[in-house]
């Protein structure tokens, strides 16, 4: 369900989904059993009422196909326990098919309406969709710009403030920023970025959570060990 929410609402739903997932994680088994019973109940209800679930309109067949296609594409990622945009690239093809099929049915019905409704309804739908996605794109653009600035300032700090680190030095980073909102910063790659500055294959890079951990590790590693601390905004400073 989280992936379908991601398709519809964008990455704005990720914090909400993660909170729900954490809250319901301990109840995964009972919730799974409940969902199974609900599905069985719906099937029995439809059979008792003799309601056919076979798609009669060709577009509903496309809707069903789109959902099945996207679900199959997402199966390899279901066991990972989290969701992210990059998992949805192939599956989004199925969602596009669903949207086109539903839009086709909608506009076929609109053709039967009055002249004013033929233009007002599509115009309202297009306007809402346009401004919704325009807002999401601007939000994403701002997030990636901010995270890119953290990366840029971090590398500029070493280029300007620490140009002459001794070869074979050990760098310990405290509170390395992984992401800002939904934009990645340094999930990986910080050692590689530093290599492009110093070109030192003997340089070692460590990442810890707290200053106390960094100090303890520095005592173990000995001389030529430097500690750098990221604050909550991603600004870097050297711990003397």
Image (spheres, rainbow, N blue to C red):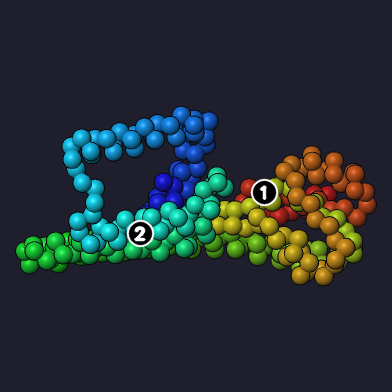
Using the image as rendered, state which of residue 16 and residue 73 is in the foreground: 73
Residue 122 spot, x, y in % from top left: 20, 64
Q: Label 2, secondary structure: give it.
A: helix
Residue 74, position as x, y percentages in the image: 48, 54
First of labels 2, 1 by sequence position: 2
Residue 138, placed above or below residue 1: below
Asked if one can make out residue 27 in the rendered structure from this viewpoint, the answer is yes
The answer to whether 40 is drawn above or below residue 206 in the figure is above
> What is the total number of numbered labels drawn onto the structure image?
2
Residue beneath disc 1: 231
Q: CA distance from mark 2 to mark 1?
A: 45 Å
Task: Please indicate, yes or no, whether residue 139 appears anywhere in the rendered image.
Answer: no
Q: Nearer the viewer, residue 10 or 35?
A: 35
* Residue pictured at 80% horizontal, 44% vertical: 214
Residue that appears at 24% across and 61% down: 59
The residue indicated by pointer 2 is 66
Using residue 136 as the reference point, say whether residue 55 is left or right of it: left
Q: Nearer the viewer, residue 45 or 173?
A: 45
Neighbor class of circle 1 (other Cα within 10 Å; few <14, some 14-19, many 20+) is few
**Above/below status of 64 relative to 194:** above
Residue at the spot x=14%, y=67% of the render? 119
Residue at image point 80% right, 56% down: 205
């Amino acid at each position: 369900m989280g992936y379908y929410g991601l398709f519809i609402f964008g990455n704005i739903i990720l914090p909400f989904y993660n909170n729900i997932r954490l809250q319901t994680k301990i109840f995964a088994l009972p919730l799974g059993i409940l969902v199974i019973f609900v599905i069985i109940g719906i099937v029995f209800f439809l059979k008792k009422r003799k309601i056919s679930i076979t798609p009669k309109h060709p577009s509903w067949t496309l809707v069903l196909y789109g959902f099945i296609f996207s679900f199959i594409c997402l199966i390899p990622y279901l066991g990972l326990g989290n969701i992210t945009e990059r998992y949805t690239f192939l599956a989004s093809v199925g969602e596009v098919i669903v949207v086109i099929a539903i839009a086709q049915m909608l506009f076929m019905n609109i053709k039967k309406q009055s002249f004013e409704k033929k233009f007002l309804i599509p115009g309202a739908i297009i306007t809402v969709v346009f401004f919704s996605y325009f807002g999401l794109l601007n939000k994403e653009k701002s997030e990636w710009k901010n995270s890119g600035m953290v990366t840029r300032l971090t590398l500029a700090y070493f280029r300007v403030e620490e140009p002459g680190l001794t070869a074979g030095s050990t760098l310990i980073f405290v509170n390395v920023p992984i992401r800002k909102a939904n934009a990645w910063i340094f999930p990986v790659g910080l050692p590689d970025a530093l290599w492009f500055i110093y070109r030192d294959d003997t340089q070692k890079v460590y990442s810890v959570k707290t200053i106390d951990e960094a100090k303890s590790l520095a005592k173990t590693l000995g001389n030529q060990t430097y500690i750098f601390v990221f604050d909550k905004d991603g600004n870097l400073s050297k711990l003397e």
